[in-house]
Amino acid sequence: MDPAGLMWDAPNLAGPDTLDLQSADFAHYGALSRVHAAERAGGQNLSPALTWNPIAQAAQLLLVVEDPDAPTRRPYLHCLAFLDGAVSSLDRGDLSVPLGHRVQLAVSALGDGYFGPAPPKTHGPHRYIFQLFALRVPLVVGTGSDPRSSVAQDADVLARGRLDGTYQRG
């Protein structure tokens, strides 16, 4: 499936600089382990550890996790979270529970927080796109069916980074 519709592709989320987004839990284009999968897919629903280079001018960070291979009209939203601009890493599981001022879990497809991979059993591997945007001005997501629309329109991006993982249900 064409990844069109990812937050990454929104014209005003293309920042001038790059964030080096990495994980100790999986390599770029590598497989996510079962521990990161949703409970209904046999996992523990623990978000992977993430690290990136800090951007001094960032007032806020926006982290979005989407599955462009889901059988839905738009990429399936697994997590949308706001982080304090000074944060430069998340430990395994940090997106699975509220962390106070460091991380504000805005939404996932099934509520607040991280919702791990759970592709249909017969679909083969799905891609999970972790997208991090360093914002000059903090954003607030209003209520609505899909917060990605307002975020893509209102963001002032300083830098961005991306880490792609895969998961296949066995």
Image: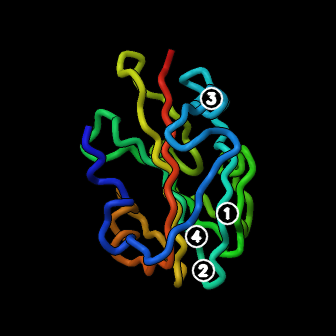
Give the mark, 3 or 2, whose residue is nearer the N terminus. 3
Q: Position of residue 40 (x, y in %)?
A: 55, 24
**Which amino acid, mark 2?**
Ala
Locate residue 144 relative to residue 19 in the image: left or right.
left
Q: Quick check: 58 above or below 32?
A: below
In the picture of the structure, the residue carrying the numbered disc 3 is 33
The one nearer the camera, 47 or 147, is 47
Residue on which disc 2 sits: 58
Circles 4 and 3, Cβ within 8 Å, touching? The answer is no
CB under 8 Å between discs 3 and 1: no
Between the residue at mark 2 and the residue at mark 1, the CA separation in whole angstroms equals 14 Å
Q: CA distance from mark 4 to mark 3?
A: 25 Å
**Disc number at residue 61?**
4
Q: Secondary structure at mark 1?
A: strand
Q: Are marks 3 and 2 in contact (CB under 8 Å)?
A: no
Q: How far apart in space, not on screen, are marks 3 and 2 (Cα)?
A: 31 Å
Quadrant, the N terminus: top left
Query: What secondary structure is marked by label 3?
Result: loop
Which one is in front, 33 or 140? 33
Q: Residues within 10 Å of mark 3 (few under 14, many from 20)?
A: some
Badge nearest the viewer, 4 or 1: 4
- Residue at 55 percent across and 41 percent down: it is 115
Residue 51 x, y percent position in the rendering:
68, 57
Between the C-alphas of marks 3 and 1, the distance is 23 Å
Of callouts 3 and 1, the N-terminal one: 3
Give the amino acid type for the residue marked by disc 3 in the picture. Answer: Ser
Q: Is residue 26 above or below residue 6?
A: above
| Classed neighbour count for the residue bearing mark 4: other residues with Cα under 10 Å, few (<14), some (14–19), many (≥20) | many
Whether residues under marks 4 and 2 lie with C-beta atoms below 8 angstroms apart, the answer is yes
